[in-house]
Amino acid sequence: MARKTTYRSRIQRTIDAPAAKAFDAWVDAKTNAKWYASSANHDAKVGGAYSNSNGDKGQFLEVSKGKKLRYTWENPKNAPGTVVTVNFRPFGRNKCKVQVTHSKLPKKTDIDKFQEYWNWATDSLKSFIDSGRRMTMDAWKKAQAAEAKAAAAAKAAPKKAAAKKAAPAKKAAPAKKAAPARKPAAKKAAPARKK
């Protein structure tokens, strides 16, 4: 029997907080409800269940405090039967890298969908840790569009400047030189006549 092809989506974000703080914000149901879903229930232990107001639910497969979460994803409207792994790695002083891998995705088109989804989620986590406020998906999409527009403008600006520098300045056409005056042809002296 042939193995069914599945796909995975992976994103990573740097968070200005220790790994333990980012982990706790993800796994603690009350805190999670402040940046991710409007309500959540988590029994954060291996075999424990979770659910939230987004329709996500499943079971924790691995819980390594401050380091890693792995859980099933059983949202009936959104790629049920998949697995999410979240790694929290220290990075520099009081920072961490949060890497989210969503695996066993049934369709290739799910890759982009979950890239967007987890980028929003980790940016919302970052916003919550930085400011105490969640970032809605709509606000995130507007911010992404504004960043893309600014990046395109910044990318185009050097090209326009370079094009102006590269274009030779139009110089006035040089004045036509007058043809040198010709000396009148010397008259040949008539041969002397013999007398």
Image (cartoon, rainbow, N blue to C red):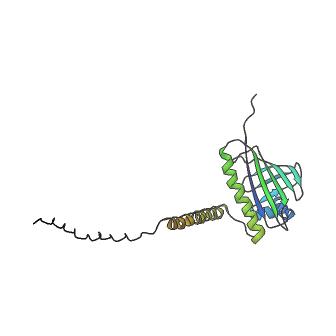
- Judged from this view, the residue extending furthest toward the top is 1
Instruction: Answer above or below: position of 169 versus 121.
Output: below
- Residue 25 visible from this viewpoint: no
Q: Residue at x 68, y 63 (%)?
A: 136
Front-most of 174 and 38? 174
Task: Residue at 61%, 62% (x, y): give it.
Answer: 148
- Say how many tags the image has: 0
Judge left or right: residue 70 versus residue 105. right
| Residue 11: image location, x then y, percent | 74, 54
The C terminus: image quadrant = bottom left
Where's residue 115, x and y in %?
A: 69, 53
**Residue 73 position within the rendered picture, expressed as x and y whole percent measured from the top left:** 77, 48
Quadrant of the rendering where the N terminus is positioned: top right
Q: Is residue 169 above or below residue 111?
A: below
On the rendered structure, is 25 left or right of 165?
A: right
Q: Nearer the viewer, residue 171 or 52?
A: 171
Asked whether residue 183 appears in the rendered view, the answer is: yes
Q: Nearer the viewer, residue 104 or 184?
A: 184
Whole-percent x, y for residue 85 in the image: 81, 51
- The residue depicted at 82 percent of the width and 49 percent of the height is 71
Point out the residue furthest to the left here: 195
